[in-house]
Amino acid sequence: MPDSPMLKVCFLTQDTGLAEAIARALGDGFEARGSSELRFEQLGETLAWAHVILIDLRTNVPEDFGEAALRLMSEVNDLRIHPPMVVLCDEAQQLLFLRAIEHGADDSVLNPPNISELRRILRRLYKLYSSERELNRLRGEPAGRLHELIGTSAPMQELFSVARKIATCDVSVLITGETGTGKELLARAIHHLSGRRDGPMGAFSCANLPETLVEDELFGHERGAFTGAITARCGRVESADHGTLFLDEIGDLGLGLQPKLLRVLQERRFERLGGNKTINVDLRLVCATNRNLGEMVQQGKFREDLYYRLNVMQLHLPPLRERRDDIALLAQHFLLSAAHQFQKPAANFTRAALQVLEDYSWPGNVRELQNVVQRGIVLSEGATVDVCDLPASMRLEPAESEETIAPASAEDGTLSQSYEQEVKRFKRALILRALRQCDGRKAECARKLGVARGYLHRLINQLGIQDREVENPAEPAERKTGVRPGDVTLYN
């Protein structure tokens, strides 16, 4: 198991000299970063990184900085789980200290700080913070989620169950599955549930890159290792020390680099490119591929010993077409996320749109679904995403000859068409009926139907409704669609 991670301290102060001095004085076991930023929305990454927040509220601090710090403390304190906060203040600032406590401060340190006392306070608060996070984790992920992965289908629930067991054991994991199924999200879930969760999580794709570039990215280089190497650089392996490294498309890793990666797995050591110094590293390796590594071993394209070291535990992510029960759940999740991102009012799909999504084969898997939903949000009018907002390749094209649409049987109510064609026939009859009642006035018709005018125009064009059909009720709605306008009932 990895050693105890560094205790990460975010010091909010305008005194950069003091921030540097405290960072040096804390010494081994601590990593301190100074920042003068006090806007909550700008500190998202810092708050996620920090274990404890130290805030400068000394007498010589400008008043506006102190007030901004108190506001920030209130916002941080409103979070369900947040890093503990310690204020640095002068002995005479009793009133300010009480205000800081009211705004969520967990402790205080007098200026000038006693470093031994500061270390003790930081360690104590970090221990409490770690316990709170662990308790929250042990309460369990929602049944349909594993960190950022979503799925209630039987294949995904089985995968989540196995992944939770694997995550707590510090072994290498090989994730297989088609492109776009979410292999990196599964790797991040394993890291999040493991004992290395407070360590770094690095990711790198080995796909379609020259071997020399991959070697430099993974293992770094020393100064002068090649032309242009003016400074030393640590690679992804070194950066993931005490954490997890995710290597995507591991099947594309060149044969020349495979022994070096094998050595990392076996001996936990390596050398940078152009260097002789051996660097020790402690990391967990999670790899992913959409290729059959077993076949590649047989073909001599992948080392057998490396394959067995990587494939200690294997997890397979099923393609989206094999877990269709999750399509509606994923689509709704992506819809709400994209609507918030693009500031659009869309909140759901029409029944027809959901049916199209569920019937589609999804060769691009979850990634393609996310892109399709985002497209639908951008094109949607109003609060719903309809079939016409989806890509043309996924929906019924409007250019079909109307004469080829056979009428439904009036006697037995059976359907002679596909779901999409029946929905299209219903929409056409409904819009024609509304247009005739409004004497062809489209703005009034849109209000009557409760849709945006632009959306109505697009439906009229998509369904091939002609002005002559609106002007002459005896014409074709019944003949062309097989549905009598009088039979149409509006439903939600």
Image (tube, rainbow, N blue to C red):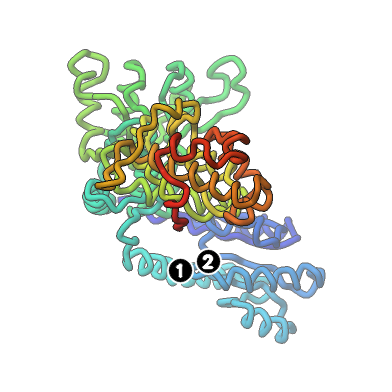
| Residue 210 visible in the displayed image | yes
Residue at 62% x, 81% y: name it: 101
Residue 285 locus on image (x, y percent): 33, 38
In front of the other: 70 or 273: 70
Residue at 66% x, 85% y: name it: 98
**Mark 2 residue type:** Pro
Choose top left, top right, bottom left or bottom right for residue 432. Answer: top right
Residue 291: image tag = none
Contact flag, marks 1 and 2 (Cβ < 8 Å): yes
Residue indicated by mark 1: 129
* Circle 1: element type: helix
**Mark 1 residue type:** Tyr
Choose top left, top right, bottom left or bottom right for residue 104. Answer: bottom right
Residue 114 locus on image (x, y percent): 61, 71
Residue at 78% x, 75% y: name it: 59
Would residue 9 appear left or right of 240 to someone viewing this image? right
Query: Where 408 sits versus 76, above or below?
Result: above
Q: Earlier in the sequence, mark 1 or mark 2?
A: 2
In front of the other: 171 or 426: 426
In front of the other: 188 or 479: 479
Label 1 to label 2: alpha-carbon separation? 7 Å
Would residue 193 appear left or right of 489 to someone viewing this image? left
Q: Residues within 10 Å of mark 1 (few under 14, many from 20)?
A: some
Residue indicated by mark 2: 83
Choose top left, top right, bottom left or bottom right for residue 324. Answer: top left
Residue at 28% x, 50% y: name it: 167
| Residue 111 visible in the displayed image | no
Q: Quadrant of the C terminus?
A: bottom left
